[in-house]
Image: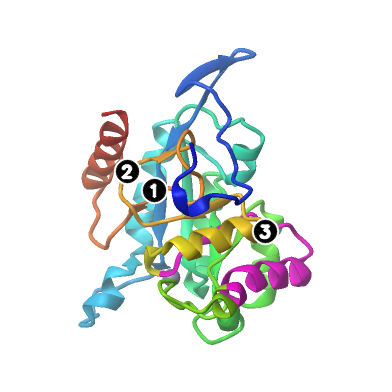
Amino acid sequence: MSPWWIENVDVLIPTAFAMEQEVEGSCITSHFPILMYHHIREYDDFSDIAAKNLSVSPEEFHEQLNYLAKNGYHSITTKDITKNTVPCKSVMITFDDGYYDVYKNAFPLMNEVKYKGVIGLILWKIDESDYLFWPDIVELHKANWEIASHTWNHLILTQLWPTILNHQIRDSKKDLEKWFHIPIQTFVYPGGFYWPNAIKTVAQSGYRYALSTHFWEANLLDYRLKLNRINILPGTTVEKFSNLLQEAEKNFKK
Ligand SMILES: [Zn+2]
């Protein structure tokens, strides 16, 4: 049954399939980790803790990708979810805010292991210094990365007027679709905050998926407009990284 706050909204009913099952000889799953990154950049000389905490160094990121590739993880975007073909042992790699260093530092490393990412754009930041330029976004899209909306202005979506919510959530989707000629099906809540009205607007705007910042694996059998993610902080060694993945999976299975 739908929660009270999404009553009368055309909500996606999760497809009923078991947590893991065989389909035509391949194993598909309904749960997987979604990793959350912001900047992929060096942060050693940062005194600003907030800026540092949004950063993972290219070396750390490289090691994390190698760990995933060596351990047989498949990289997915929400397209795989829509087709109901999420392979067992999948990972979704997401980058919030649309920073240029993702294109400069993360994209080549992702290509090395043939992984694709999901990038959540703040529309008014496109083409600003430190952020992605138009051609970078087009190139990421051509490399099968998913483009997601992370609102027009990165407002925290708590108690906002409906017109503002609509602009941030619905208009940002429409504008990205118009600019890039692609369907946008994923929304990323700024700061991970979702107020009931925000979720309702996300549903009414036609998004199929939305990403929160709750720790744990994403669970497709649950409501898909607040999928869990794992925040990767600076200083995450491969050992810590592997523990995080295991912990997220364990909590999911409880
Ligand atoms: Zn953000």
Tell me the quadrant of ligand 1.
bottom left
Please, what is the dominant secondary structure of the magenta stretch? Answer: helix
- Magenta part of the protein: which range? 166-190
Q: Label 2: how many residues lie within 10 Å, few (<14), some (14-19) or many (20+)?
A: many
Q: Would residue 195 be seen by someone viewing this image from the given angle? A: yes
Three-letter amino acid code at the position of disc 2: Trp
Name the element at disc 3: loop
Residues at marks 2 and 1, CA–CA distance in whole angstroms:
6 Å
**Magenta region includes residue 195:** no
**Location of mark 1 (residue):** 228
Three-letter amino acid code at the position of disc 3: Ile
Quick check: marks 1 and 3 in contact, CB under 8 Å?
no
In the image, is residue 70 above or below residue 161? above
**Location of mark 3 (residue):** 184
**Nearer to the camera, 153 or 199:** 199
- Say left or right for 222 vs 134: left
Q: Position of residue 114 (x, y in %)?
A: 57, 44
Toward which corner of the image does residue 59 lie, by quadrant?
bottom left
Name the element at disc 1: loop
Could you tell which of marks 2 and 1 lies nearer the N-terminus? 2
Q: Quadrant for the C terminus, please.
A: top left
Quick check: marks 3 and 2 in contact, CB under 8 Å?
no
Residues at marks 1 and 3, CA–CA distance in whole angstroms:
19 Å
**Nearer to the camera, 183 or 64:** 183
Q: Position of residue 242 (x, y in %)?
A: 27, 40
- Say left or right for 46 vs 160: left
**Nearer to the camera, 15 or 28:** 15
Quick check: marks 2 and 1 in contact, CB under 8 Å?
yes
- Name the residue rendered at 45%, 49% in the picture: 4
Q: Which numbered disc covers residue 216?
A: 2
- Say left or right for 56 vs 26: left
Toward which corner of the image does residue 202 lie, by quadrant?
bottom right
